Image (cartoon, helix red, strand yellow):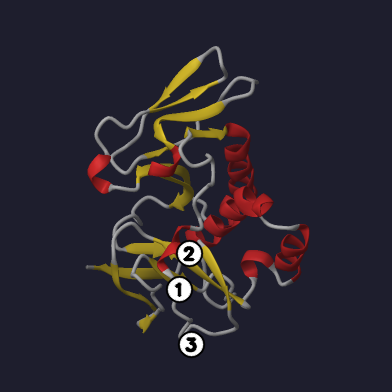
Amino acid sequence: MIALLMAGSLATAAPAVQEEQAASDEIVVTAPGEPFAVPVAKLLKAVAAFDKDHARLAPQGILWFELSPRDPAKWEGLTAALTDGTATIPVVLDSNGRFRLPPLPPGDWTLRANRRGSSLAFRALVRTPGFDGDQRRLGDMRLHCRVNWAVQSDRYSFVQRAGFGMIGGCDTTHIAFFFRERRTIAAASLRGRSLPIGEGGHSFFAPVGMKKVGNDEIITLAFR
């Protein structure tokens, strides 16, 4: 998810976004050159945000964590595990690099992978089964926003966090929220109207703050 200042409607074209901004829903975990590692405490913030609102926004939605190489040619051999320094629990990644966080006993757990942190992209996302092809459910996008804000908010100053809350957070219409896709997007639409695409084609605008657009509305994507 990325946010740009904007007050607009579904029919209003959002400003183009730079490609490097489209990765801002990534969970920042590791200093450049260091092995991939993220404290599970950070992931539990996503779980708490998901549990708070999933019944209202995405009752059938699933919270996934997605770990993928920045170079699509380097999937082979990617492994991950949860460790507390004594016990190690292997993480099974699906074909998209996704996994669900299992219940863990008390402890200082860390998610680790066998790659440098800078070579991997890592994020939380929400998907309702059946909406992982060319369709995205708006309620999932709304919950995705809340989940990622819970994880990422400590990257921002107190003033920025307070300001985001004052304008309504993920319910605001004063910010344009863009959502990242791995594949290049050719077009996005909702109710037959085109939605803005981020510069570079790897993100699309979703009107998560528009209350008149219901959670079950579907955004349709076309990929190149």
Element on which disc 2 rests: helix
- The residue positioned 35% from the left and 29% from the top of the image is 79
Q: CA distance from mark 1 to mark 3?
A: 15 Å
Residue 206 locus on image (x, y percent):
47, 71
Amino acid bearing label 3:
Thr
- The residue positioned 58% from the left and 32% from the top of the image is 40
Q: Is residue 13 left or right of residue 40?
A: left
Element on which disc 3 rests: loop
Element on which disc 1 rests: loop
| Callouts 2 and 1 close, C-beta under 8 Å | yes
Residue position for label 2: 21
- The residue positioned 35% from the left and 40% from the top of the image is 97
Q: Is residue 86 above or below residue 2?
A: above
Residue position for label 3: 12
Residue 46 in sight? yes
Amino acid bearing label 2:
Gln
Q: Residues within 10 Å of mark 3 (few under 14, many from 20)?
A: few
Residue 61 in sight? no
Q: Is residue 13 left or right of residue 176?
A: left
Viewer-side residue, 138 vs 188:
188
Q: Nearer the viewer, mark 3 or mark 2?
A: 2
- The residue positioned 27% from the left and 30% from the top of the image is 77
Q: Residues within 10 Å of mark 1 (few under 14, many from 20)?
A: many
Amino acid bearing label 1:
Val
Residue ranking furthest to the bottom? 12
Residue 72 locus on image (x, y percent):
26, 47
Residue position for label 1: 17
Q: Is residue 200 left or right of residue 87?
A: left
Viewer-side residue, 131 vs 122:
122
